Amino acid sequence: MHFTLTEEQAAIQETALSFAKERIAPHAAEWDERGHFPVDVIRETAALGMAAIYVPAEAGGSGLSRLDGALIMEALAYGCPAISAYISIHNMVAWMVGKYASPEQIAEWMPKLATMQWLASYCLTEPGAGSDAAALKTTARREGDHYILNGTKQFISGAGDTDFYFLFARTGGEGASGVSAFGILKDTPGLSFGANEKKMGWNAQPTRQVILDNCKVPVAHRVGAEGHGFKFAMSGLDGGRINIGACSLGAAWAAVDKAKAYMFERSAFGRPIADFQALQFKIADMATELEAARLMIYRAADALDRGDPQASMYSAMGKRIATDLGFNVVNEALQIHGGYGYLRDYGMEKLVRDLRVHQILEGTNEIMRVVISRKLLGTR
């Protein structure tokens, strides 16, 4: 067991952190206030190998590990968790293409995904199918060389601004076995998008419905065999949970650093507030919780890399603890800032707003407890 990063991992983390501090953090508040999706800055990460992180090199990716990916997402989230989370979603799609698409599809799609010429969205959730994803209602009816898709996807990150949609639809009967996967391009006839949702946080990336109205998709764009889609969807969740946990780590890391600096800048009763034991204890607890969550995320990523049979449980544990504790840490950092923490100028309230959704997406933290308990007890 080693608890230090290798030289290569440290270099990967430093590259991502430098990018976050130089290209993301200075603009994060403005992007949030304007609701601006900075596709130009996001595309710059592709040149650093961050667009197809754990896609094998032979498939056109960077060939890095899940732990490397977690280090990258954590570091990018130091600048803005909403941007880092979108890059995580793009990487999930790139990995699914590299893992499940045909050689012909990989040859056509991966060069554009790995360079971010195409930005990607992941389309599973529906208005009536969130935690119960197997209940999705979007249909895909085959007609000759095409499928005709009808339905609506909900809460899709990047939708309307992205170029490639990895989407799940029902080609067969009810339940998981009737679901298939498709790669759909933005200009496909019958594909449209809802209004950009007005959200509490994550304002630097758009969230829209993806609407399919007799959307005509070539059979050649079905990924894998009919009925295999739900298996693909579930296989991506472990990595997605690790990454969203890592995004919480990065934001909490930034919050701890902001709080430490503020404790020496702010004085009360003639002394820096860093001298007060109540706040010393608070910052100590915040740092301890951050480190505990970080260890759990790294543990889960390592388990996924090694093919550990308990990787799904560790991923659920890591997601649950990192998103819960990450939110607690940024909320306490806001408290340390007092009234100033409530102002947009200090960047603390943005972190609180951004991290709240991490406890909901990639499976709610209640669902994480279901996953963990089922693994522990051997129940369904």
Image: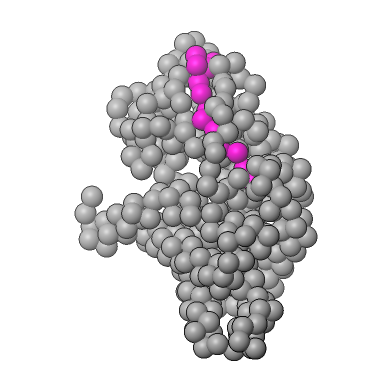
- The range drawn in magenta is 204-216
Q: Is residue 376 left or right of residue 112?
A: left
Residue 172 screen position, x and y as percent: 35, 23
Say whether residue 349 is visible. yes
Q: Is residue 213 magenta?
A: yes
Q: Nearer the viewer, residue 167 or 223?
A: 167
Quarter of the image where one finds residue 268: bottom right
**Coloured how?**
one colour
Say whether residue 1 is visible. no
Q: Which residue occupies 51% across, 75% down?
A: 286
Outermost residue, front direction?
269
Q: Is residue 54 above or below residue 154?
A: below
Residue 176 screen position, x and y as percent: 33, 34
Q: Is residue 172 above or below residue 307?
A: above
Q: Which residue occupies 63% across, 79% down?
A: 263
Q: Which residue occupies 41% across, 60% down?
A: 320
